[in-house]
Image (cartoon, grey):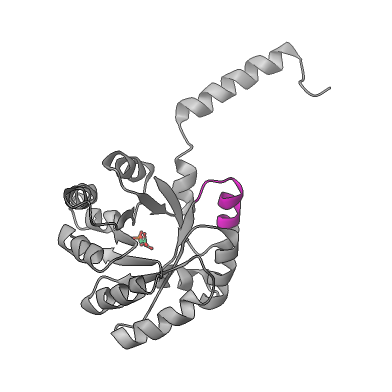
Amino acid sequence: MKIFADTADLAAIETLAEAGLIDGVTTNPSLIAQSGQSFLAVIAEIAVCVEGPVSAEVTGTEFDQMMREADVLRAIAPNICVKLPLTLAGLRACRRLSAEGCSTNVTLCFTANQALLAAKAGATFVSPFVGRLDDIGLVGCDLLHDIRQVYDNYPNLQTQILAASLRSANHVQMAALIGADAATMPPKVIEALAEHPLTRSGLEGFLRDWAATGQSILQ
Ligand code: E4P
């Protein structure tokens, strides 16, 4: 499963990319607003940091404006993936951009039917929002199961499932077990994937015993 960082925090992206832990980046207008930076400038900087897809989202709601914005975004770098909302206008723009060879990410997906339409529109990725379904009392991971099953039923559908709105290491593990093609998460969730209390306490024990030997590897 590919791992994407869901952030516009350049320093965090650089650290994760250097460690080889991320295959791409996703952003959304809220993350750009949080970063306090210029949208086009920060996207250009991120696109240099990672080789994989960098999702940059249009903000227009009508087809014509989406297409004009997409032209600006895709001109930034070859690894820009144009992110479009799962609306009829967004799907139409997705179809047009995909036909032109542009990578696309259809976002704000909450049902398997919506994911089916995203695939019909030729989306490179569809982003089902797991955590936001949990927020309203549903089981967000069920959506990943449903989309996986629909896509597997029709192998001609080429869209990759990009599990999104993942808030915990458990969400990520579920996405991987279900067979999501990719998962996007905040940097703190990526860091949490490496954590286990037995890893921590085991290391403390090894270091205590090592210190008691009085030895040093470095002379
Ligand atoms: C995905 O592309 C979105 O940017 C993101 O995963 C949304 O996550 P949230 O529901 O935690 O805001």
Q: Visible in this render: residue 110?
A: no
Q: Position of residue 195 (x, y in %)?
A: 47, 36
> On screen, 172 above or below 88?
above
Q: Residue furthest right?
A: 219
> On screen, 7 above or below 67?
above
Asked if the stretch drawn in magenta spans residue 15, the answer is: yes
Q: Residue furthest top?
A: 213
Q: Visible in this render: residue 88?
A: yes
Q: Residue at x 17, y 50 (%)?
A: 146
Name the one closer to the observer, 24 or 207. 24
Name the image quarter holding the C terminus.
top right
The secondary structure that most of the magenta stretch takes on is: helix
Q: Residue at x 52, y 46 (%)?
A: 21
Asked if the stretch drawn in magenta spans residue 26, the answer is: no
Q: Position of residue 187 (x, y in %)?
A: 49, 52
Specify start and end residues of the magenta stretch as a single range: 12-22
Horizontal side of 56 relative to 38 (left or right) equals left
Q: Residue at x 42, y 48 (%)?
A: 2
